[in-house]
Image (cartoon, grey):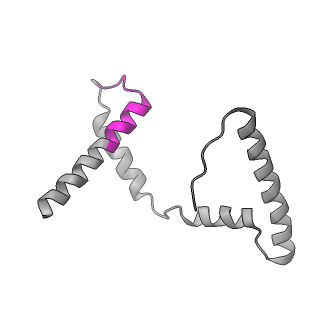
Amino acid sequence: MAVQPTLSGSAGVNMEKTLAAAVRTEMVVFQSSGVRGRSLQQVYEYLLSIPPASVEAERSFSAAGQLSTKIRSRLSDATLDKLCFLRSFFRSNSKKQSSN
C-alpha cells in the first residue's frame, strides 16, 4: 500500500472526514454482506502490515536511550530521530563492508 502525502489545514480535515464516512459506510455493507469495499480493504491491509512483535520498537527506544543522556537532554525529538537513523545507517553499512 502506498503512503499518501499528508495534507495540512482544512483540506486534511475534509479528507479525513470523507475517509471516515467512507469507512463507516463500508462497515455497514461489510456487516450485512461480508464484502469489503476499497477503503475498508486498504485499512485492513494496513493493519495487517503492522508487525505483531514490538522488537523493532524496543530496539528503537533502546538506541534513543543510549543517545539521549543528561548531557544531550536538550536535543529535540527531530534531532534525536535523525541521530538514531544515522547510527543505524552507519552500522548497517559497516556490517556490509566487513562481510565483503
Left or right? Give the position of 75 relative to 26. Answer: left
Left or right? Give the position of 70 relative to 45. Answer: left
Left or right? Give the position of 26 relative to 46. Answer: right
- Residue at point 33%, 45% (across, down): 62
- Residue at point 39%, 38% (across, down): 81
Relative vertical location of residue 5 with respect to residue 50 in this rendering, above or below: above
- Rendering coords of residue 73 (x, y %): 34, 25
- Rendering coords of residue 86 (x, y %): 30, 42
- Residue at point 29%, 36% (across, down): 67
- Rendering coords of residue 19 (x, y %): 76, 52
Relative vertical location of residue 7 with respect to residue 35 in this rendering, above or below: above
Q: Quadrant of residue 34?
A: bottom right
Q: Which residues are magenta?
A: 72-85
Towards the viewer: 50 or 21: 21
Residue 14 belongs to magenta span: no
Towards the viewer: 71 or 24: 24
Mostly what secondary structure, the magenta segment? helix
Q: Quadrant of residue 100?
A: bottom left
Q: How many marks?
A: 0
- Rendering coords of residue 44 (x, y %): 66, 66
Residue 77 belongs to magenta span: yes
Image quarter of the N terminus = bottom right
Left or right? Give the position of 100 relative to 66. Answer: left
Towards the viewer: 70 or 6: 6
- Residue at point 73%, 62% (across, down): 39
